[in-house]
């Protein structure tokens, strides 16, 4: 079986395989923690914002992480629409 996200046509070195976009208070402790554990188990590199200070806008660190990620996974929840991501 090929490693996750392998591609001979893509030569860029990504910092992250996955950038999860979610509304923290809705899914962080429940769905997201299980999802991240499964990705870690499969050796998929994920951007994790556990240590970031929360603000009302999309800060430069998040923008950089999005640019440095191969894909974004959007996790919809009740309040996702009021999130800035």
Image: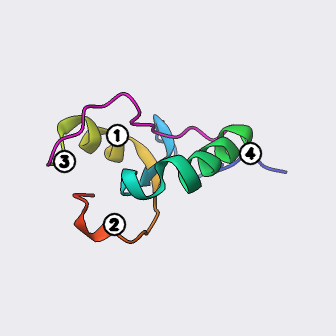
To which residue does mark 1 refer?
65
Disc with the residue nearer the chain's start (1 vs 2)? 1
To which residue does mark 2 refer?
80
What residue is shown at x 57% (from left), y 56% (from top)?
31
Q: Give the CA separation, mark 1 to mark 2.
A: 19 Å
What residue is shown at x 31% (from left), y 31% (from top)?
52
Q: Mark 2 or 4, which is nearer the eye?
A: 2
Q: Give the CA separation, mark 4 to mark 1.
A: 22 Å
Q: Quadrant of the C terminus?
A: bottom left
Q: Give the CA separation, mark 2 to mark 4.
A: 31 Å
To which residue does mark 4 refer?
3
Which quadrant of the view contains residue 54? top left
Dot 1 surroundings within 10 Å: few (below 14), some, or many (20 or more)?
some
58 with respect to 19 (left or right) = left
To which residue does mark 3 refer?
58
Viewer-closest of 15 and 46: 46
Dot 3 surroundings within 10 Å: few (below 14), some, or many (20 or more)?
few
Q: Give the magenta range.
A: 43-56
Q: Dots 2 and 3: beta carbons under 8 Å? A: no
Helix, strand or loop under label 4:
loop
Q: Give the CA separation, mark 2 to mark 3.
A: 14 Å
12 with respect to 63 (left or right) = right
Helix, strand or loop under label 1:
helix
Q: Give the CA separation, mark 3 to mark 4.
A: 32 Å
Q: Mark 3 or 4, which is nearer the eye?
A: 3
Dot 4 surroundings within 10 Å: few (below 14), some, or many (20 or more)?
few
Residue 55 in magenta?
Answer: yes
Disc with the residue nearer the chain's start (4 vs 1)? 4
Residue with the most extreme left position: 57
Disc with the residue nearer the chain's start (2 vs 3)? 3
């Amino acid at each position: 079986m090929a490693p996750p996200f392998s591609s001979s046509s893509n030569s860029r070195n990504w910092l992250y395989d996955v950038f999860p976009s979610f509304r923290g208070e809705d899914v962080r402790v429940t769905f997201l923690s299980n999802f991240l554990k499964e990705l870690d188990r499969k050796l998929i590199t994920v951007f994790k914002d556990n240590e970031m200070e929360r603000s009302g806008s999309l800060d430069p660190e998040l923008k950089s992480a999005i640019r440095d990620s191969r894909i974004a996974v959007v996790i919809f929840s009740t309040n996702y629409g009021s999130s800035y991501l």
